[in-house]
Amino acid sequence: MTALRWVGFAVGVAVTAGTVVAVMKTLIVPRRSWSILSASVGRVGFKLFHGVARRLPSYDLADRLLGFQAPFVIVGILVGLLGAFVVGFALMLLPWAEPTLGDALREAGSSVFTLGFIFTDAPVPTVLDVLGGATGMIFVALTIGYLPAMYSEIKRREATVRRLEGTCGTPSWGPEVLARHTLAGALDSLPTLYDRWDGWCARVAETHLKYPVLTHFRRPRARNHWVVTLLAVLDAAALDITLRPSQHHGAARLLLDQGVGCLEAVAYPMRRVDPGHRDVGLDRTEYATGVERLVAAGFPVEGGGEEAWEAFASLRSRYAPLAQQLAFWLIAAPAPWSGDRDGFPGLTAAPEHPLAWPAGDPPNPS
């Protein structure tokens, strides 16, 4: 029995050390760090929420449910880390004062949660109790800094999405972005839009690769999604390049490169996404509808036909497959050119007609 208690002590040391490393990976290390506990909780949350969401009768109900997925995963990770600390310190207490495992768990919980209502009056258990209390306090302090920083990134991400949505319609659609800029006489401001989204992509790539749970946070409004909006901006840049070939499109091309990198970074933790898929995700009829929308709005189309389509399809094949797979697995709001949503047949969301402005001058999308 004594030997088993010392084996338990060794296991407790390993569990506690492993949990310290997991905390550092989750809350401190400023790079993508894989943790067994975080990955396990994330998989459980994904299967649980998506399994239920795909059986709900409407998209609005599914979106409302999926809004709790990311908070559930975060709470699950933090609770799991605290629980691992309690188990680790409890196992380390076993060789002293002949406690049962239940007594050891109560004392470890008392120390880790800094309650102090149970303790063993002996040198080594006292040291372990103090270490447990210090561990609990440090963990809480790290969590206090972790959550506000995470929610700050969500707000920054959604603020840029909301800004585009307010002037270019809901849900976002690439041709609609260009059409409304045309109607507002703001085509000259497109490079500024591309520059803004270039920086947005760089920031999202960095934060969402480090904290994959950010990918699953959803907007307050069900009828748009940040992945769909990013796809619309990239489509707008690709259309601009291929339909106005005589113009200088440096900002648009840089945005496409940055957008591909952003989508790859976001998709990397989601093992379900196939980065090698290169289908353009669009047929000629859908493309023609988008070009017609631009012509109706007065967009200065310089060329068309097969050559323009092939050039656009070549550009779109770089980013659209990743974006559409992400939209599928995240059950993003249905939108034109964003792919199918399995489990929600018949749910389509056409954008507003670009000529349907309120009374007065159209807003300036810039």
Image: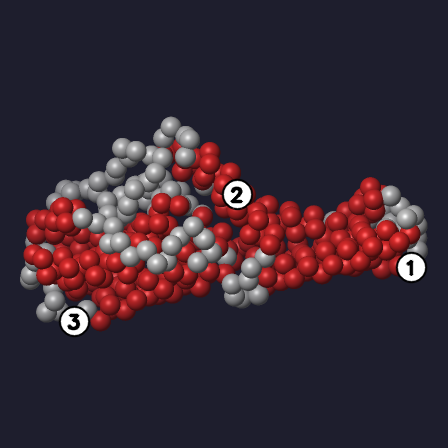
First reached walking from the N terminus: tag 1 or tag 3: 1
Residue at 7% x, 56% y: name it: 305
User: Is 309 situated left or right of 59 in this image?
Assistant: left
Toward which corner of the image does residue 299 lie, by quadrant?
A: bottom left
Toward which corner of the image does residue 197 lie, by quadrant?
A: bottom left
Residue at 28% x, 47% y: name it: 338
Residue at 28% x, 65% y: name it: 255
The crowding category of the residue bearing disc 3, from other C-alpha atoms within 10 Å (few below 14, some 14 to 19, many at least 20), is: few
Task: Name the residue type under label 2.
Answer: Gly
First reached walking from the N terminus: tag 1 or tag 2: 2
Q: Position of residue 328 (x, y in %)?
A: 36, 45
Q: Is the C terminus in the top left, top right, bottom left or bottom right quadrant?
A: bottom left
Mark number displayed over residue 123: 1
Q: Which residue is mark 2?
A: 45
Mark 1 residue element: helix
Labels 1 and 2 touching (C-beta < 8 A) = no
